[in-house]
Image: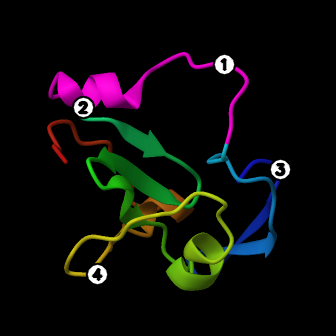
Amino acid sequence: MAHARLEIIDDRLKIVKPGQHKFIHTVSEITMSGKQALKKGKTVLHVTNVGVFKLTERGMMLIEVMPGIDIQKDILESCPMKVELPESSKVAVTDSSIVTGNGFALRWGVVY
């Protein structure tokens, strides 16, 4: 969410004041075609302050969420775009070290 007010409470992210969603119905300019990327077998990820979304044939799928984010309230009910969940309905939760910085280490080689 752009311009949202977020706080870190007990190693979890809390949306204090929602902002503008980054996923919207219409755009003024197309700079990258997700459909074309999928046709070419490319992986398309969108990393936001609430989670990680992967473009699939079914649409934009939430594959990882920040700790403290309520998927139903903070994403599914408030986002103007339809967000898909994995068939298992289980979404990975990002390690809290990315929120706090405590023990955070950048690791290469993770493939979604």
Type of the residue with mark 3:
His
Q: SS at mark 3?
A: loop
Q: Nearer the viewer, mark 4 or mark 1?
A: 1
Q: CA distance from mark 4 to mark 3?
A: 29 Å
Position of residue 71 measured from the top left corner of the image (x, y, whole percent): 51, 78
Stretch of the chain drawn in magenta: 26-42
| Most frequent secondary structure within the magenta stretch | loop
How many dots with numbers?
A: 4
Task: Determine which residue is flagged by label 1.
Answer: 29
Magenta highlight on residue 29: yes
**Residues packed near mark 2 inside 10 Å, few (<14), some (14 to 19) or many (20 plus):** some
Magenta highlight on residue 96: no
**Residues packed near mark 4 inside 10 Å, few (<14), some (14 to 19) or many (20 plus):** few
Task: Determine which residue is flagged by label 2.
Answer: 38
Which corner quadrant holds the N terminus?
Answer: bottom right
Q: Nearer the viewer, mark 2 or mark 3?
A: 2
Q: Nearer the viewer, mark 4 or mark 3?
A: 4
Q: CA distance from mark 2 to mark 3?
A: 30 Å
Q: Residue at x 20, y 81 (%)?
A: 88
Q: SS at mark 1?
A: loop
* 19 to 35, vertically: above or below: below
